[in-house]
Amino acid sequence: MATVLMVDDSRTSRKMLRAVLERGGFEIIGEATNGEEGYLKYKELKPDVVTLDITMPVVDGVEALKMIKALDGNSKVIMVTAAGQKNKMIDCIKAGANEFLTKPFDQQEILDVITKLV
């Protein structure tokens, strides 16, 4: 069973994502509400996959992605985007994002993307 770290400042988004992933057989080993906390939890927990929101306080998703990739070049990071964030998506691709998910979430797409990465 693959382990997942969810990083998103929206409690509702984390709750919805958790429900989908747990039904799909994934283990949520941690949650964080901003990019700095997400980076620290990544270092501590070493998950198989990270879901990382782009727009967050303290450290945004793009910077957190860069920090995680600098720590572990083999990390699997899925960026979670809202509509209209095309410029940020380009930054994420350059920084090494493995995949993208768009809010609102499509349950099957989430499971397919994570399964493909692990």
Image: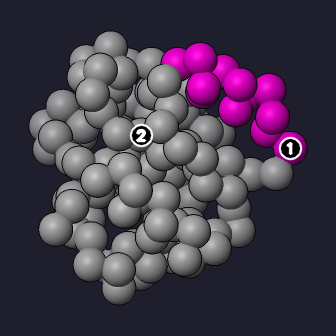
Determine the image quadrant of residue 46: top left
Q: Is disc 1 surrounded by few (<14), some (14 to 19) or many (20+) residues within 10 Å?
A: few
In the rendered image, residue 53, in percent from the top left (x then y), is placed at 56, 46
Outermost residue, front side: 116
Q: Is residue 54 above or below residue 67?
A: below
Q: Is residue 14 above or below residue 78?
A: below
- Quickly name the residue at label 2: 77
Q: Considering depth in this image, is 58 or 15 the residue closer to the camera?
A: 15
Residue name at image x 44 percent, y 79 percent: 20
Residue name at image x 40 percent, y 56 percent: 116
Q: CA distance from mark 2 to mark 1?
A: 20 Å
Amino acid carrying mark 1 in the image: Gly
- Quickly name the residue at label 1: 84
Q: Identify the magenta region.
A: 84-95
Check the picture and name the quadrant holding the N terminus: bottom left
Q: Is residue 17 above or below residue 5?
A: below
Outermost residue, bottom side: 23
In the rendered image, residue 27, in percent from the top left (x then y), is placed at 22, 68
Residue name at image x 63 percent, y 69 percent: 105
Q: Regarding mark 2 in the picture, which secondary structure is present there?
A: strand
